[in-house]
Amino acid sequence: MRIIFDTDSAVFNDDAAALAMLLQRRDLVEILGVTVVAGNHTVPQGAEHMLHLLELTGADAVPLYLGADAPLVNTPARAARQEAQWGPITFKGAFDAGPEVLPPHGGRIAATRPRETTAVSFIIETIEKYPDEVTLVAVGPMTNLATAFRRRPDLAGRVKSLVFMGGNARVRGNVTPAAEFNIWFDPEAAAAVLTAPIPRIVMFGLDITNHAPIRKTQFDAIVAIDTPLTRLMRHDMGPRFERDPDATYYVWDCITAAWLIDPSVVTVSERLPIEVDTTFGPSYGGTRVSEEPQAEDRLVEVMLDLDIEKFYGMYEDLLTR
Ligand code: RIB
Ligand code: CA
């Protein structure tokens, strides 16, 4: 499977752990490139986290490309207006970040640097190079993908599939009652991508990712095995478990990675007409199952439940190798 890993990066918890899991199965998954988009972090900060991870796992030959540093329409000012009118947004990611770039764990900026090509150009060139073969794995806002397809609409039909973490079909959101973070950060991009003629779209929304949070039991089992990766995990995730042994971490993007490696981890899915709400209002960025689907509406494979023990087993195994 040839993939482009499109990520809003993060400390170890989620995007980085998902990439680490995939890097352990390079017999199954060929990572053609990592493309960074603004979301959890600004692009320069997110890139440093990912470059650090690539070096730590000996995968620094995997190229990394810098992508869109802002959503298509959403802005910090709009987010402030949304909050003032319709209530809190519990996480605003890069909208709350300053321009400074902090070195990742270890205090060192990675020696490997991003490639000169932009993420959008890389996505376009890669689909052209491998028509009908590329799986786009989107675990952040979809700004890079929307920009690529806006520039080259003909290429949406030439990817193999889009597998994304984001949205909420039948459960409430995680940043507002209506919306999940990745879609809320750039709803217009998500709406454009999810209506593009991509042959297969698979959604890992909160419906499934809510089911398998990581608790101290799994964390302790992993960090008991000392590797450079588990040291990073201990640094990034340990303090919260020290403060609160009952804490939970959602590892949204890791569930997407687990399915790419072993699809049998998902036990329930449905093909549903998914819509993104792009109206600036309390439900901005929410996703929902269309109540009046039209015959021509495209269906998204919405993943709904998983074999939790199998997932925990994969997570522990892949992150301690
Ligand atoms: O809502 C969860 C998603 O937002 C995850 O992809 C997380 O990494 C953040 O991007
Ligand atoms: Ca993410």
Image: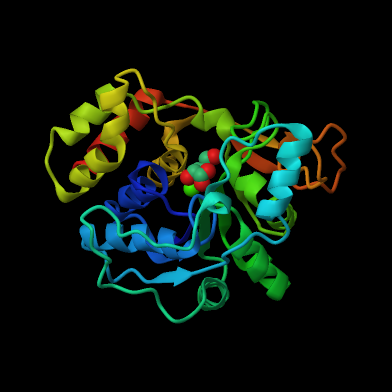
Where in the figure is residue 271, as x and y percent of width and height?
A: 67, 37
Total count of labels: 0
Q: Residue at x 30, y 24 (%)?
A: 243
Q: Quadrant of the N terminus?
A: bottom left
Q: Position of residue 96 (x, y in %)?
A: 55, 50
Instruction: Give the residue drawn at x 23%, y 37%.
Output: 317
From where the camera sits, is residue 254 visible? Answer: yes
Asked if residue 132 is positioned above or below residue 306 in the image, the reply reads below
The colour scheme applied to this rendered structure is rainbow
- The percent coordinates of residue 110 (x first, y second) are 27, 67
Which of 168/79 is in front? 79
Q: Is residue 321 something one can see in this rendering?
A: no
Going 62% across and 38% down the picture, which residue do you hit?
180
Q: Which residue is outermost to the bottom?
A: 116
| In this view, 300 is above or below 54 | above
Q: Quadrant of the C terminus?
A: top left
Question: Is residue 279 placed above or below 225 in the rendered structure?
Answer: below
- Direction from residue 231 to residue 83 in the image, left or right: right
